[in-house]
């Protein structure tokens, strides 16, 4: 008989799984608050309706479940055949009837949760490959999903805000985003300061940096390209102290 609890006993992984599940529940709540007609509404992502986001989250769960199957069996099962296939899938999903779209989200979330739950302890360290080509242990899939559900719950533009995202998720998001900037070299002359967490990222060696600062939730919202409310900027490119806030470099 299949066990009804997670096979892993790693406390850090169990905590990460809980954060992902809470994010899924949060996304579900914001989605279920929307009427069927409101699914056609705009989101914080240009060119995407709420239908597109819901389809993306549904198919993303299926894609991550394929990686868990890979980790469990050793048989290579890619997330997607290609990025074109992924994009086509999302666009198709956005055309589904409201009830089919909601079922896609619900059923795929349950499927992924079961795959996580039933993955043997040792298989969590098996390597899989993301759509970007990175080889990562199966444990990384938990963060991949956590990031998607929490951020896209905000993107639904249905009352959720970055301040609703748990602090550990926000902190890791900011590390991911600033890390991507650093890898690409797009953070030259840019320093990001989190005023309520004593955190600093970016080009700290610059003699005259542009400094963007604010509380954690506001800084992550800005860094993720979702707005600049609650942050201020000083240095080159700003008119004066607390002047115009520059657009954040792209991170994905």
Image (cartoon, rainbow, N blue to C red):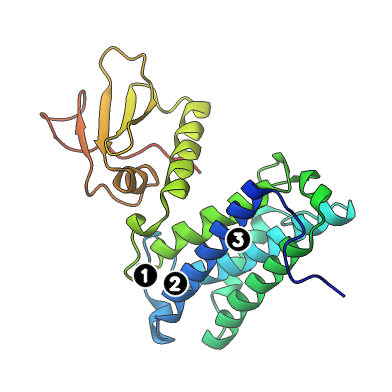
Q: Which one is closest to the eye, mark 2 or mark 3?
A: 2
- Most extreme residue toward the left, as rendered? 240
Gap in angstroms between the C-alphas marked 2 and 1: 6 Å
Q: Earlier in the sequence, mark 2 or mark 3?
A: 2
Query: Residue, x 56% and y 66% (percent of image)?
Result: 57
Discs 2, 1 touching: Cβ within 8 Å? yes
Discs 1, 3 touching: Cβ within 8 Å? no
Is 203 displayed left or right of 22 in the figure? left
Query: How would you rate the neighbour count of disc 1 (Cα within 10 Å): few for under 14, some for 14-19, many for 20 or more?
Result: some
Q: Give the answer, above or below, for where 107 lies relative to 118.
A: below
Q: Earlier in the sequence, mark 2 or mark 1?
A: 1
Query: How would you rate the neighbour count of disc 2 (Cα within 10 Å): few for under 14, some for 14-19, many for 20 or more?
Result: many
Query: Residue, x 47% and y 49% (percent of image)?
Result: 169
Residue 87 has which mark? 3
**Residue marked by disc 1:** 42
Discs 2, 3 touching: Cβ within 8 Å? no
**Residue marked by disc 2:** 50
> Which of the pair 26/2 is nearer the observer?
2
């Amino acid at each position: 008989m299949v066990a009804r609890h997670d096979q892993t006993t790693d406390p850090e992984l169990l905590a990460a799984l809980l954060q992902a599940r809470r994010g899924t529940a949060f996304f579900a709540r914001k989605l279920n608050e929307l009427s069927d007609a409101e699914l056609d509404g705009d989101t914080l992502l240009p060119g995407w309706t709420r239908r597109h986001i819901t389809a993306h989250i549904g198919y993303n769960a299926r894609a991550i479940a394929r990686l868990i199957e890979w980790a469990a069996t050793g048989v290579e099962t890619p997330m997607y055949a290609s990025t074109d296939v992924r994009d086509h899938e999302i666009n198709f999903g956005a055309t589904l009837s409201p009830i089919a779209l909601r079922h896609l989200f619900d059923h795929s979330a349950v499927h992924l949760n079961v795959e996580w739950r039933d993955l043997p302890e040792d298989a969590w360290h098996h390597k899989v490959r993301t759509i970007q080509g990175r080889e990562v242990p199966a444990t990384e899939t938990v963060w991949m999903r956590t990031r998607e559900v929490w951020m896209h719950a905000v993107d639904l533009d249905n009352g959720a805000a970055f301040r609703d995202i748990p602090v550990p998720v926000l902190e890791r998001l900011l590390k991911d985003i600033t890390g991507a900037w650093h890898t690409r070299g797009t953070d030259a002359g840019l320093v990001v300061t989190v005023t309520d967490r004593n955190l600093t990222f970016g080009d700290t060696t610059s003699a005259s940096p542009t400094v963007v600062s604010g509380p954690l939730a506001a800084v992550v919202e800005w860094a993720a390209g979702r707005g600049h409310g609650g942050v201020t900027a000083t240095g080159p490119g700003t008119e004066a102290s607390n002047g115009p806030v520059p657009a954040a470099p792209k991170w994905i």
